[in-house]
Image (cartoon, rainbow, N blue to C red):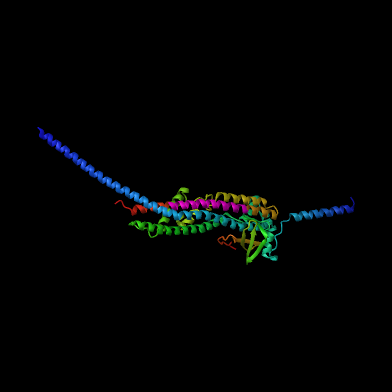
Amino acid sequence: MNLHQTRTWGWLLAAVMCLAVVGCLPDGRPDKTQMAPVDYFRATQANTITPDGPILMSTVQEVAPNVLQYETAEGGVYQVRYSNQGEGFRYFDVRRVDRGTTVVAAPAGE
Amino acid sequence: MSLPDQSAGRSGRFNRRRFLEVLGTVGVAGGIGAGLYGRAQWQRAALAGAMLHDAQQVMVPREQRELQTLPVRARNEIRDWFHAHCLNASEFAYEVCSPSFAERLAACGTEELKQQCVANAFLARVVSAEEVQERLQVIAQELGNELDASWRGCCQELSLRWQMQISGGGYEVSLPRDLAARLDQLVRHSLNEAMQTADGSLAPSFTDAVSSIGTAALLAVPVVVVIPELALSAFFVRALWVLVEYVVRLVSGRVQGLQAEITHRVAMLGRRLGSEYESELRHCIGQLHQWQQDAVRSFTEDYSRSAISII
């Protein structure tokens, strides 16, 4: 094997190792200070399954200060309050708004 | 010679006549008494029957409405409430996959400590048995107050209907002013008896401490007590710990896979808890309705006995 081939293999090996390291890194949490709460919600809750099915991200919107609204695959429309907790948010006081029933408010002690 | 025989015969006829007179008097008196008693019983049965008929017209539609709507509302409230836990489960996934959490885990000396660390983070971030118990109590309180209000309305209507019934009959004894309190007393007696039958460790003072009969009935009766302090359904406690163990095993995975798996499991737990709670409430509310029916029947029988005398 000549020098050129050795270098080529070396670069390939380094690239593979870099990819392996990146692949093993934990997924970075989006920085909530750099994005709107709606965008943070969309970025972090895309894989969330609720008792009413997955959330339709295109329906997420902020309807009041610290209140987000979203729809689910089964047709429910929900509003949820959020508050800061560490690097992310804490969600509480979910209310379904399309059925007309509400959960008795019990905000988390923040 | 014949004189002694004549007097003996006269004496015998006199005794027989006397005997027959007494017998006849007793028989007539007994017959009159039996007749009066029978008439009174018949009238009492008729009055109690009429009052019960009136009561059924008021109570049955109310009972059907409560059984159809309240358990379903409770199920939906539980499921809606679990949405927040599913959202927080996603945040939990990010937390346990972060470098800072990895450092915390590395600082744990043994495998058991690591598992406990993850479990504690899950119970603090996502859902705990205590939170569920509190939520069930809040829902039971809400529904219990509705049941009580409905029962008070029912008692008021019964009072009006019965007043018309007894006024028409001209009975001497009037209905109690607070009919609802009288009936509540009878229902609470049945509730206490059921509590003592189900578990001798739960004293009647438990239901006395809960002023709402509806709430006491929903909280106290058929929920399987696994951990007495929590009083949660057996399936929920088992399911929660299975979920925690599953999460501990998954922690080494990537965030996205972890999010989907955990939230899916939490969502399933929420759906199942909602369904179980719905069926438990149906049983509770049905039992409460039975006690209310028994209270009304007992009251009508007592009232008819006091309103209609034998003479």
Depth order, front residue of A35/B123 = A35
Q: What secondary structure predominates along the stretch shown in magenta?
A: helix
The N terminus of chain B is located in which quarter?
Answer: top left
Quarter-of-image position of residue A95: bottom right
Tell me, yes or no, if residue B113 can be seen here. no
Q: Residue A103: x, y in percent?
A: 56, 60
Q: Which residues are magenta?
A: B266-293
Give the number of callouts.
0
Q: Is residue B119 left or right of residue B188?
A: right
Say above or below: A109 vs B200: below
Q: Is residue B279 magenta?
A: yes
Depth order, front residue of B136/B121 = B136
Q: Residue at x 40, y 58 (%)?
A: B161
Tell me, yes or no, if residue B48 can be seen here. yes
Q: Residue at x 47, y 59 (%)?
A: B149
Q: Residue A45: x, y in percent?
A: 67, 58
